[in-house]
Amino acid sequence: MNMAVTQGKPDSVIPHSDQGSQYTPMAFGLRCKEMGVRLSMGSVGDCYDNVMCESFFATPECELLARRKFKTKAEARIACFEFIEAWYTPSRRHSALGYKSPVNDERITAEGLKSLSP
């Protein structure tokens, strides 16, 4: 979330999570408020409200983690970072985005919004 807010500099960030113990403490809610992030949380026992997130996490599980063994946590962390930042976000095409990568979809959307501005 820190990276989304500081590097991406989006107009708004709305992370969606389940009711997991890492997302329900007061400290997490306060951190979201400090960052100007509006938190979205699924209902208890509802597996369908988090489908997009589950789909995202299935990708590195199948395409990265299931194919490699890591010697250290640091090595795994670096591999995950490189997978997401160097390949998934800039290059991997998504059917939900009209077969564009997230970076290209975001660029095209921003250009479209600029053309609507007076």
Image (cartoon, grey):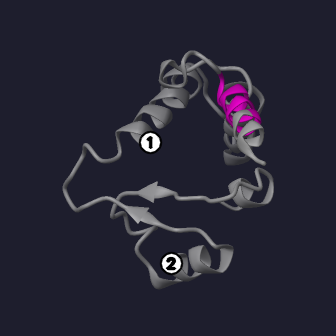
Question: On the rendered structure, is 46 left or right of 59?
Answer: left
- Could you classify mark 1 by the number of other residues whose Cα lies within 10 Å: few (under 14), some (14-19), or many (20 or more)? few
- Could you classify mark 2 by the number of other residues whose Cα lies within 10 Å: few (under 14), some (14-19), or many (20 or more)? some
The CA distance from mark 2 to mark 1 is 19 Å
Question: On the rendered structure, is 78 left or right of 93?
Answer: right
- Along the line of sight, which residue is nearer the eye, 95 or 1? 95
The correct choice, above or below, for 68 with respect to 21 in the image is: above
In the rendered structure, which amino acid carries the disc numbered 2? Gly
- Along the line of sight, which residue is nearer the eye, 87 or 114? 114
Q: Where is residue 116 in the image (x, y as percent from the top left)?
A: 71, 41
Question: On the rendered structure, is 68 left or right of 96?
Answer: right
Residue ID at (61%, 28%): 69
Q: In which quarter of the image is residue 1?
A: bottom right
Residue tagged 1: 53
- Residue 109 located within the stretch drawn in magenta: yes
Magenta segment main secondary structure: helix
Residue ID at (73%, 46%): 74
As helix, strand or loop, the secondary structure at mark 2 comes to helix
Residue tagged 2: 29
Q: Quadrant of residue 20?
A: bottom left
Residue ID at (65%, 33%): 70
Q: Where is residue 99 in the image (x, y as percent from the top left)?
A: 57, 15
In the rendered structure, which amino acid carries the disc numbered 1? Cys
Q: In which quarter of the image is residue 51?
A: top left
State the residue lying farthest toward the front: 118
Lower position in the chain sequence, tag 2 or tag 1: 2
The correct choice, above or below, for 26 with respect to 104 in the image is: below
- Along the line of sight, which residue is nearer the eye, 57 or 17? 17
Look at the image and give the residue range highlighted in magenta: 101-111
Total residue callouts? 2
Residue ID at (67%, 73%): 35
Q: Where is residue 24 in the image (x, y as percent from the top left)?
A: 40, 74
